[in-house]
Amino acid sequence: MDLDDRYPALSDLAHAAKRRVPRFVWEYLDSATGDEASKHANPQALDQVTLVPRVLSVQTANLTTRLIGRDWSLPFGIAPVGMSGLIWPGAEVALAQAATKANIPYSLSTVAAATPEIVGPHTDGRGWFQLYPPRDPAIRRDMLARAKDSGFNTLILTADVGTPSRRERQRRARLTNPMRLTPNIVAEAALAPAWSLATLRAGVPRLRTFDKYADDDAPGGTTGHIGYRLRTAPDLDYLKALRDEWDGALIVKGILHTEDARTVAPLADAIWVSNHGGRQFEAAPAAATQLPAIRAACPDTPLIADGGVRSGTDILRLIALGADFVMLGRAFHHGLAALGPKGIDHAIHILRKGLIADMGQLAIATPLQVRNRLK
Ligand code: FNR
């Protein structure tokens, strides 16, 4: 049967993924912080956005979108997700390959299970490297050099993790980093044989980019691992230092306040409006809610947005509110966990087809024209 008939929506891939990974893996990927109000706010805010169709003037859709000096084939890309390789072994390379094939950006997290050296060669010089800001400037400079030398040309500073969040659901799932093979983890893994076999072959996932900097055996825990211990809460001086040290494009991720957007705009090539998929602060608004004010405050700054995107329609909704480009985190991992690498391609396909169908309804030729259809 055609994949489109079996999995017509991203939600179908999510359901299939949930059945194929151990419970603790699903809890890691799906969870947010607190009672998850900010995670739920994301799709809720998107559902409020209505776009008015036009008739008698259907256009041919051109999805090519320019962002930071490059033409991408689609107006969306893959957001950084820590420990992707826990969700499915080899995830980082599979995601990078799928993104490169589709000519969309792939962002490699600092806390991925694969290093920039491993992933970079699969990005064709177009990769984005996401930085959790190391406290030690020597480690920072080393990481930047490693990213650059591995072929990453764009740096994302994630600014919304200055302090760790509680992530209660992840704690309840008893997942630690490094992963400890406790009886409950082993029992859950036994119920997911495809995941377990693939993980046995690939090795237990860990934060490999940090191998070089690990200097002790301090206990890990869900938010106490080396990735947290080495990082700092970045301030404006930190951002300026990064700007000086990194000669590629620089994106600042995790902006929700208009004043922060104004402060960052002169130093960044793009601002990424995001509530981190609801994982940092339960009372945070959705990117969708904040975008119009940030767009007005920074009319000339490229804006990237994410959070709760389930379809091509949601991508158009965020663009209508002021985004130039849209990213998704969990959805591509659902595709991979459900169907292997072809599931990532299928998620991209679902979004592409959805965009084309909606642009037909809206009678627009480019995604940006959706701003004229906002009700
Ligand atoms: C994330 N996100 C994230 N962001 C980041 O800058 N660095 C990181 O390492 C991670 N890690 C991470 C792990 C997991 C499991 C999730 C779900 C998310 C946030 C991510 O980049 C993005 O902002 C959200 O995932 C977007 O929301 P959706 O598309 O997942 O709803």
Image (cartoon, grey):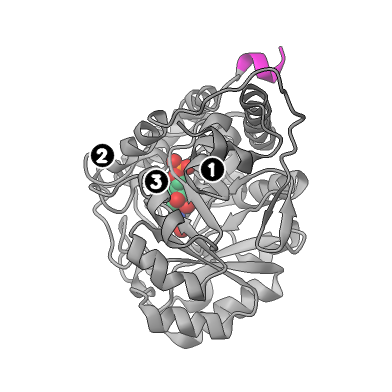
Foreground residue among 330 and 294: 294
Where's residue 244, x and y in %? 55, 85
Start and end of the magenta stretch?
1-6
Residue 340, compared with residue 276, is above or below; it is: above
Secondary structure under the numbered disc 2 in the rendered image:
helix
Q: In the rendered structure, does residue 5 fall within the stretch colored magenta? A: yes
Residue 256, compared with residue 12, is above or below; it is: below
Q: Which residue is mark 2?
A: 37
Secondary structure under the numbered disc 1 in the rendered image:
helix
Q: Which residue is mark 1?
A: 319
Where's residue 54, x and y in %? 61, 22
Q: Is mark 3 within 8 Å of ligand 1?
A: yes
Which amino acid type is shown beneath numbered disc 3? Gly
Foreground residue among 235 and 219: 235
Q: In the rendered structure, does residue 346 fall within the stretch colored magenta? A: no
Where's residue 309, x and y in %? 48, 36
Q: Tell us which disc is closer to us: 2 or 1.
A: 1
Q: Which residue is mark 3?
A: 277
Image quarter hosting the C terminus: top left
Residues under labels 3 and 1: Cα distance? Answer: 18 Å
Which amino acid type is shown beneath numbered disc 1? Ile
- The answer to whether residue 260 is visible is yes
Q: Is mark 1 within 8 Å of ligand 1?
A: no
Point out which mark residue 166 bears.
none
Q: Residue at x 41, y 52 (%)?
A: 274
Residue 365, compared with residue 291, is above or below; it is: above
Foreground residue among 364 and 185: 364
Q: Residue at x 36, y 56 (%)?
A: 256
Q: Residue at x 40, y 43 (%)?
A: 288
